[in-house]
Image (cartoon, grey):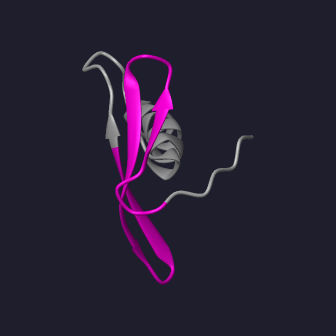
Amino acid sequence: MLVLSRKVGERILIGDHIVVTVVRITPGSVRIGVEAPDDLPIVREEIKEQMKVRPAAEASSDDP
């Protein structure tokens, strides 16, 4: 894992098509902006985990 220190307004480039910008820093949180091609899904990890659990739960509730 690459760990970087950035200040508000500074950017990180990932390849040629992804830009991560530090938007705001407050005690206990950092707000970032991500610019990426429309065909590249960007999802928070906790949402992806919920998506894994929810379809399985929905499938089991559909079974008689």
Asked which quadrant contains residue 25, the reply is bottom left
**Looking at the image, how many numbered discs can be counted on the residues?**
0
Asked which quadrant contains residue 39, the reply is top left
Q: Is residue 61 visible?
A: no
> Which residue corresponds to the image point at 39% horizontal and 34% vertical from the top-left?
19
Asked which quadrant contains residue 41, the reply is top left
Name the side, left or right, on which 50 lies relative to 36: right
Pinpoint residue 43: horizontal percent, then vertical percent: 41, 39
Between 20 and 28, the one lying in front of the other is 20
Name the side, left or right, on which 10 lies relative to 35: right
Examine the structure image and report whether residue 60 is included in the region drawn in magenta.
Answer: no
Name the side, left or right, on which 3 lies relative to 7: right
* Residue 54 higher or lower than 5, as above or below: above
Pinpoint residue 28: horizontal percent, then vertical percent: 51, 80
Examine the structure image and report whether residue 27 is included in the region drawn in magenta.
Answer: yes
* Residue 48 higher or lower than 32, as above or below: above
Quadrant in which the C terminus is drawn: top left
Classified by dominant secondary structure, the portion drawn in magenta counts as: strand
Between 31 and 40, the one lying in front of the other is 31
Pinpoint residue 44: horizontal percent, then vertical percent: 45, 46
Residue at the left extreme?
Answer: 38
Q: Is residue 38 visible?
A: yes
Quadrant in which the N terminus is drawn: top right
Pinpoint residue 42: horizontal percent, then vertical percent: 38, 34
Between 23 and 9, the one lying in front of the other is 9
> Which residue corresponds to the image point at 41% horizontal and 51% vertical from the top-left?
10
Residue at the bottom extreme?
Answer: 27
Residue at the right extreme?
Answer: 1
Region of the chain picked out in magenta, as a range: 7-33
> Which residue corresponds to the image point at 40% horizontal and 27% vertical from the top-left?
18
